[in-house]
Amino acid sequence: MNFPAIGAIYRFEMARTWRTLLQSIVSPVISTSLYFIVFGGAIGSRMTDIGGVSYGAFIVPGLIMLSLLTQSMANASFGIYFPRFIGTIYEILSAPISAIEIVIGYVGAAATKSIILGIIILATASLFVPVRIDHPLWMALFLLLTAATFSLFGFIIGIWADNFEKLQMIPLLIITPLTFLGGSFYSIDMLPPFWQRVALFNPVVYLISGFRWSFYGKADVRVGVSLGMTLVFLALCVTAVVWIFKTGYRLKK
Amino acid sequence: MFHTIPPPGAVASASIVSVSNLSKTYASGFKALNCINLDIRRGEIFALLGPNGAGKTTLISIICGIVNASEGTVLADGHDIVRDYRAARSKIGLVPQELTTDAFETVWATASFSRGLFGRRANPAHIERVLRDVSLWDRRDSKIMTLSGGMKRRVMIAKALAHEPMILFLDEPTAGVDVELRRDMWRVVRALRDTGVTIILTTHYIDEAEELADRIGVIDKGELVLVEEKTELMHKLGNKQLTLTLQDPLDCIPSGLAGYELELSPGGRQLTYSYDKTSEETGIGPLLQALQAAGIAVKDVQTKTRSLEEIFIDIVRARS
């Protein structure tokens, strides 16, 4: 293992976060706070509890997941796309570093950033609504797995994209709608029976359900199924990354 | 300057880069390299010349791991660049043609990053030496975006040297830089070679190769046309020219001088005679006698060796 190289990429990426503190941390925290004010405060006060949990508290895991998914993808995709765009990728490709080490560096940094962000949002949420965590270890596991999985997914997007539009396309057109429709702001039980069945095809449902279970012990699907689906998506992303480096797809001519 | 590069080992082989039967065909079907065989000697400056699209950058990119070869093998200090890529790449530094830098990073941070990326533990003393050597020490805390083009080029060199490579590839190191900076770059390259670093540079500027290189390779249409010691190449192909400035202009070359390969300049003021300087009999003596016999008075005499540029153009033209 080339640990100095992993460390160099990781530190470089983390340094970018501190340089762009407003964009990386402050902006998501402000937007999440607005969600709590609007959904938790204004609308939530007129809604009944869901499974014994106030609406404001109910949406906390979903909102953390929303930020975790979008920020993991944004950080990792930009992290690898930008060197490709400006040409500094030559240095990564010519360095004595393996594919797995490159991935650990970029994905590790992206996941770290989104986990920090998730924790900040959790802390922010607890200022607005009473939050409790029944299963903290499971919460940490879901946080870690989701951050790692979607950072990997973002890394794949960053390699696939050959312009800035494509870089934004999948997060905006696919992931954000899936997250909103995946139960961030409601329980799947609240949907008509037909749409409940449709919702089960949305992978984000499993992430949010499992994560919410770790907070309040209540879930739309069994926690084992949630964990299994998360691991399946992680395995798919790992397979895609292995293929990318094996073939040199979009990296080497 | 540049006292940090490890000298070549006593038992090391003479060839530090060995390219065997290397070919590259891109996905588009374009064959960029065709069966290249090349050995770079330890400690030399090797200049790779060739017109645009000849395959220079593709060759360098394959050796450095940026482009995959279609066929053939490359050894860097005895290590296969594919099977043993870690050992091979750790020996190599690359300064690409394009000025690709992280604009928001500082000079110090980017050089330190490069060292770490190549698996070397942090060594602030080495980074300081490199930055001093390329005259960037005073700008170590400056963001790269604030530097001039010449300074950015030196940042690229500092990054390539941060991990103490034995082999340095310079792809068009002085493309688009002014004359003063070009001379500065040449000084840097020579100083590096003096420390034992093997340097392979590509260039469009023939005078650069003439000035710096120990050996010269000419690549054209993906084929290595020749590899020769620079002095040998100049000796073998560098015919000399004798230019005679005449007292009175001539309308045409007199019939008595028809046996000599003479060229009359427009205006008839100069006669140019090409001769093989390595030959026992250059023909200069008889020519001067013939001129005297023809009553042609000579005002001035000048000799000139054919430049590498002229040799290069002849080689490339002969193939097209």
Image (cartoon, coloured by chain):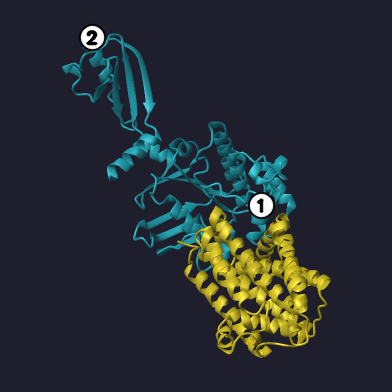
Chain colours: A yellow, B cyan
> Up-down: is B251 above or below B283?
above
Quarter holding residue B266? top left
Position in image of residue B93 (x %, y %): 57, 53
> Which residue is painted at 40% across and 36% down in the image?
B308
Under circle 1, the secondary element is helix
Q: Nearer the viewer, residue A161 or B267?
A: A161
Residue B78 visible to an observer of this rendering: no
> Up-down: is A202 above or below A115?
below
Under circle 2, the secondary element is loop
Position in image of residue A55 (x %, y %): 75, 79
Residue on which the image places disc 2: B295
Position in image of residue B99 (x %, y %): 55, 46
Assess disc 1: are there few (<14), some (14-19) or many (≥20) residues with their C-alpha within 10 Å of its C-alpha.
many
> Up-down: is B211 above or below A133?
above
Which of the two discs, 2 and 1, labels the residue nearer the N terminus? 1
Chain that bears disc 1: B
Quarter holding residue A147? bottom right
Alpha carbon separation for disc pair 2 and 1: 71 Å
Quarter holding residue B237? top left
Residue on which the image places disc 1: B110
Name the amino acid, label 2: Gly
Closer to viewer: mark 2 or mark 1 = 1
Residue positioned most to the front:
A46
Chain that bears disc 2: B
- Asked if both marks, 2 and 1, belong to the same chain, the answer given is yes
Name the amino acid, label 1: Thr
> Which residue is painted at 49% across and 67% down in the image?
A248
